[in-house]
Amino acid sequence: MELRLGDGTGVRLRVVALHERALGLGEFMLPHEALAGHVPALRDQRILIRSTDGTATATATSVRRALARYEGVRVRSATADDVRIAPTSSDQDNAVIIIGVGVIGGFALLAVVSALSLITVGRRGGFRLLRTVGAGRRQVRRMLVLETGLVAVAGLAIGTLVAAVPLVAFAVSATGSVPYLPPERYGVLAPAVTVAAGAGVLWPGSSGGRSGRGPRA
């Protein structure tokens, strides 16, 4: 196949292997010799050396001894950033992501609370009718608690399903594996949804349909 390198030189190469999982890899992987003379830096900037268990210290000592005559070469232990596929991120980048997700989640919870509050306020006439026919305030409140639980469970189930379908489809097609969400993060999401449902249903309906005057005969 014919390709054009970064300096504009056209080359004709032969495909010797195909990789199925291209995540973290370039579309084309070329041998070092094929790129010599076509890149600004002829030498590799970083080389990863893998050692067997228990031989890391001896391997590092041998490499340092072999490279001692080359100035500017430094041998050190590999870190997570050296072998990770994703690009490195700073604490500032993580803070921006957390703030962005927090703002979006806050607006979503505010919209849920507002919608449930409006619905509950519109049902106060029905609550007063229940009190008129003999329902006690505790019975009305218990009904609201059950409705809150039903709304929270239904919201979590439907939201999880709606989010899981596209995420699983994308992850399987891109990486060949299903996405993973730490249980503690889902554990934070579940109480937040429950609190939002309670604030939208229990707080506006806390009056239990009471009225200042009883029914006229």
Image (tube, helix red, strand yellow):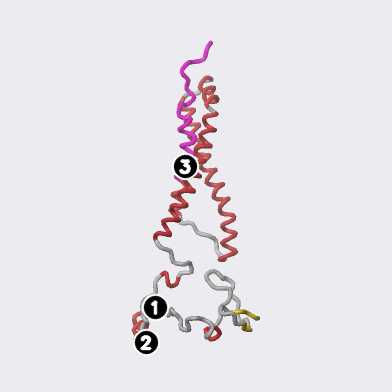
| Badge 3 element | helix
Q: Secondary structure at mark 1?
A: loop
Q: Which label is found at residue 70?
A: 2
Dot 3 surroundings within 10 Å: few (below 14), some, or many (20 or more)?
A: some
Q: Is residue 64 above or below residue 143?
A: below
Q: Position of residue 77 (x, y in %)?
A: 37, 76
Q: Which mark is residue 53?
A: 1
Residue at 54% across, 50% down: 160
* 81 left or right, relative to 37: left
- Residue 40 in picture, x, y percent from top left: 49, 81
Q: Nearer the viewer, mark 1 or mark 2?
A: 2
State the separation of the CA atoms marked 3 and 2: 63 Å
Question: In the structure shown, which secondary structural element does the residue marked by tag 2 occupy?
Answer: loop
* Above-or-below relation of 58 to 175: below
Residue type (three-letter) at the residue carrying disc 1: Asp
Which kind of residue does numbered mark 2 sit on? Tyr
Instruction: Choose the circle earlier in sequence order: 3 or 2.
Output: 2
Nearer-N-terminus badge (1/2): 1
24 is higher (above) or lower (below) than 199: below
At 53% from the left and 37% from the top, the residue drawn is 115
The amino acid on which the numbered mark 3 sits, given as a three-letter code, is Thr
Residue pointed to by mark 3: 194
Give the Cα distance between marks 3 and 1.
48 Å
Q: Which residues are the magenta region?
A: 191-217
Name the residue: 60% across, 59% down. 169
Between 53 and 205, the residue placed more toward the observer is 205
Q: Residues within 10 Å of mark 2 (few under 14, many from 20)?
A: few
As measured in the structure, the alpha-carbon distance from the residue carrying label 1 to the one carrying label 2 is 28 Å
Nearest-to-viewer mark from 3 and 1 = 3
